[in-house]
Amino acid sequence: MAMNYYDKFVAKLQEIFMMDHAELDFGIYRIMNQKRDEIQHFLQVDLLPQVKTALQGDGGNTQQTKQRMAEIEQMFAGMDIETLPDSNPNVAEYKKLKAQLAQGGNAADMESEVFSHLVTFFSRYYDGGDFLSKRRYKDNTYAIPYNGEEVKLHWANSDQYYIKTSEYFRNYTFVLPTSRKKVHFVLKDASTEQNNNRAANNMERRFALWEPENEGDQVIEVTPEGDLNIYFTYELMPKATKQKDLLAAALETITPLVPADFEEVLTAKAPTKDNPNRTLLEKHLTDYTAKNSFDYFIHKDLGGFLSRELDFYIKNEVLLIDDLDPQHINNQLSIVKAIKQVGQKIIQMLAQLENFQKKLWLKKKFVVQSDYCITLDRVPEKLYPEIIANDAQRKEWVRLFAIDDIKGDMMTEAYSEPLTVEFLKQNQFLVLDTAFFDAKFKHQLVKSMENIDEQTNGLLVKSDNFHALALLVNKYNDSVNAIYIDPPYNTGSDGFVYKDLYKDSSWLSMMENRLSIAKKLMTSDSSIAISINENELFNSKCLLDNMFAKYLTTFSVKVRHEDRILKGDKDFHEVYESLLMYAYGENFKPLKRQKDNSSDADYLYTIELDERPDELLDLGNKEVEAYAPGHYKIIKHKDSSFDYLKPISVRGSIREGNSSGRFYVAYLENLASTHSGYIFKVPNMGDDKFGYRFFWTPSVESGRKNGDYYQGAPLNRKDVIEIPYPNYVDFEKAFNDATDEGGISFRNGKKPVAFLNHVLSLQNVKKGKDFVIADFFAGSGSTGHAVIEMNKDNGKRKYLLSQVGDIFDNTTKPRIEKVIYSDSWKDERPVSRNGISQCFKYIRLEQYEDTLNNLEIKEQQTDWTNEEFQESYMLSYMLDTETRDSLLNLKWFENPFEMTLKTTKDNELVETKVDMVETFNYLIGLNVETEDWFQDDNICVVQGKTHREGLKTLVIWRNCKVVNNDQLCMFFDKMDFRTRDTEFDLIYVNGDNTLPNLKRDEDHWKVVLTEEEFAKRMFEEN
């Protein structure tokens, strides 16, 4: 039995340390596979035997006890030791050992119990690559962290980072190595379960080959573009269904259907140690399902969590006070000791792995592309000849702007190939993209721009939005005035990838992780608006209530007609979506609508009273005159005048909404039964010229329940007053008409510009002409479009947009280019060529998967004669130590202009140049004013101010292989840069140097080594 539990525990360790995925050669699995033998040896040879050691010495070493007793029996052969006196030390020892043996347990049984407990404990928290924070209280009852809040929001993954993207979910693409043809795994029918509760009934989602339903449908087909599509589904199946079996069945079906032009997918090999004949198709089928089936989260503090849980487990499920047996207490304590000792070391090693992944996830990501899109009116004409010679740029303009439709006449230069300088002069809103030009052209263009960041109207970031926001924190901290986002609605068919049984929890973690960083960008008087539908509306509100100081409202937004049914099988037709709006703090005041208050149309009445009142009443410390019916006249005039009165019914919010309503409710309403139809004149009330208020109690004849009061025109009356906007808006027509907006088609929830204009106006963006607006779920780019439209009032608003995946290249960026070029589009072609002067920067970031794929193991030459040091190294330091140089290597700074890393494109690794200059600008939060290049582009000089401290900063980048220390000093002299004067507060230089230095303050030098600052900033947590 002991071996049975031992084997189970070994299998569990194989699973939780990812030793059972030898077929995976990407991400953290590639690293763990390289360390497989070493880790397995440590776990099985070095660690698990410690269970036996821990059980020895406290009643567990049965074999040694029996052996010693046998030795003593030999000493007294033929004698009854039990009858001998205890004064003999050997006799006393024998009797003591016999008593211990009687109290002790079987060593094998004790080991079995230890391994059983360890299997039980770790199985509770590990699930498909993730450790879930189930704080078990007892049986199936769980505890949640609670600190006395009035209302507590908790979700299962609240202390984890959500790390998935949908980039490889719906369309997984890879390129055949020789023919370079593309193969796509396309998700045909994603599960659209409204909730994932069915998965609890032994159901989980699996990938399977799509089964065609209609005649003529094909599971595999060549597209008009010449690519190969293979179709899959992702649906709930019995939990016992093995993904490997489904892939094997898919492979068997696909293989005979592969066209001859794509045979390479079957003939090209991607071998593994266990499967040397694995084909390229088998590899990508495995990668596709693996990347979308597990590893959804990284725990923020796995070591602390599991350590606390292990202590709780031991106290509540191992060391049971009521079951303690005095005769076997030593054995029970030995078992506890073994569980604690071995369990804690496993936790320590798991924490090393999880903290390593956390470090990689939180690491600021490198900028691997930085380019500008700029209208020709901002480009120096001396660069025009190079532009017309660039055929790639011409083709891009034809594709985006249909410039080949421009016909010539006496006033208009016609399109031609090549283009002419005159054509460029007449089409000043053509958007030039520096990606089509070499570095020298780009450097010349950037050099021509003064106050580069100030002139740049927007920033687009192609990246997972978590890493985009993390990189922007130092540069845009406390700068964003308004945020609008349109996150995935978690419908099951919108591409959001979630863990089975944790659909809402996955979504909440994703949102909380990103909103926590976004909040750091916001100003104290800013606001955030979030479009959402009923799937996550209430979870969103609970989350935002916890994160933001002031809830403003929830808008009901009509987006489609009652009869425009999307899916007939739904219980109800969803006509409305919602918009949640929150303020960062109390300083934000939403825009109010203007109402004309200049009309006196309601002021038609005067009241004439008899000379004496019927009664004088003391009400609310006021002497109130009461006039019975017949002793007053209410006169309605034909023409209105501000000299007259207007009646207001005391009902609804009026009852408590102002002093007149409150007075009537408190003192007069109860008099209506005895003073029916009376007029009451109340002195010293109201803000009109009369100085009193008339109140009327309803008469029997009127049949009314509510009374009235009569007020004059307020003395401080304004012709225009502000009133709040309603929290219901009807944008049905705008949503229906959004198809052609921006010149791009986008089927997944394109928001109309009219709607965005309304939302941003409520956020005061229309009034704030220098506002910064962020949208980190940019999608089709509607937010950027709306900001550009608003800037036609000569505003200088800036937009920050982030989007991951192909949508960025196919939709987000092209739309921004198109709306710059033309304000009107039909069928993706410009109706007019009325554009706007604009410049935006777009950058592409290294992604988490890229970081993992660039890790290289560097074995350490270490003397393992010290077993304690070896164990400490394996448990705590191995991964950090052996991968350190692949995360940040000082050699990269010798020539930072040629630094590269591997990035993923179509699921193959491509060597990609890193923009170290741009990366560092974001790391230190530099607002760039100028950038210039010297000595054949071997020196780059960047000047600007740091965003947080406002320090005037000089950054010198050099190719140290060409520009040595002496040449650097000469360059400083030539440029008249003085390290000891006051021109700059801070100077960064890469590479060792002897530049004169001085202290800015007690802790900081003026001249700083770039490498040191780079390393500090890249790994600091926001």
Image (tube, rainbow, N blue to C red):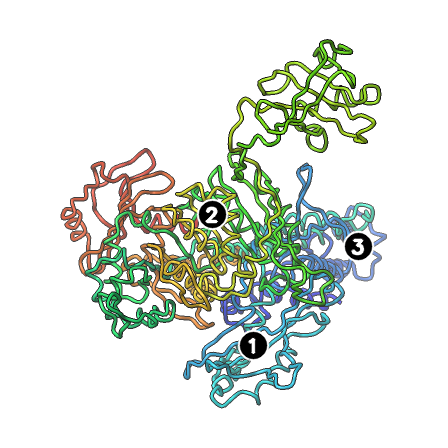
Nearer-N-terminus badge (3/1): 3
Q: Is residue 351 left or right of residue 835?
A: right
The image shows residue 794, relative to residue 674, as above or below, that is below
CA separation in Å, label 2 and label 1:
36 Å
Give the residue pinned by disc 2: 1021
The amino acid type, in three-letter code, at marker 1 is Leu
Mark 2 Cα shell of 10 Å, populated few (<14), some (14-19), many (≥20): few
Q: Is residue 538 visible?
A: yes
Residue drawn where x is 33% and y is 54% of the image: 837
In front here: 483 or 742?
742
**Tag 3: residue type?**
Lys
Left/right placement of residue 925 relative to residue 943 reads right
- Residue in the foreground of this view, choosing between 961 and 332: 961
Dot placed on the residue nearer the N-terminal end, 2 or 3 = 3
The residue mark sitting in front, 2 or 1, is 1
The reply, left or right, for residue 518 in relation to residue 965 is: right
Residue at 51 percent of width and 78 percent of height = 272
Q: Which mark is residue 98?
A: 3
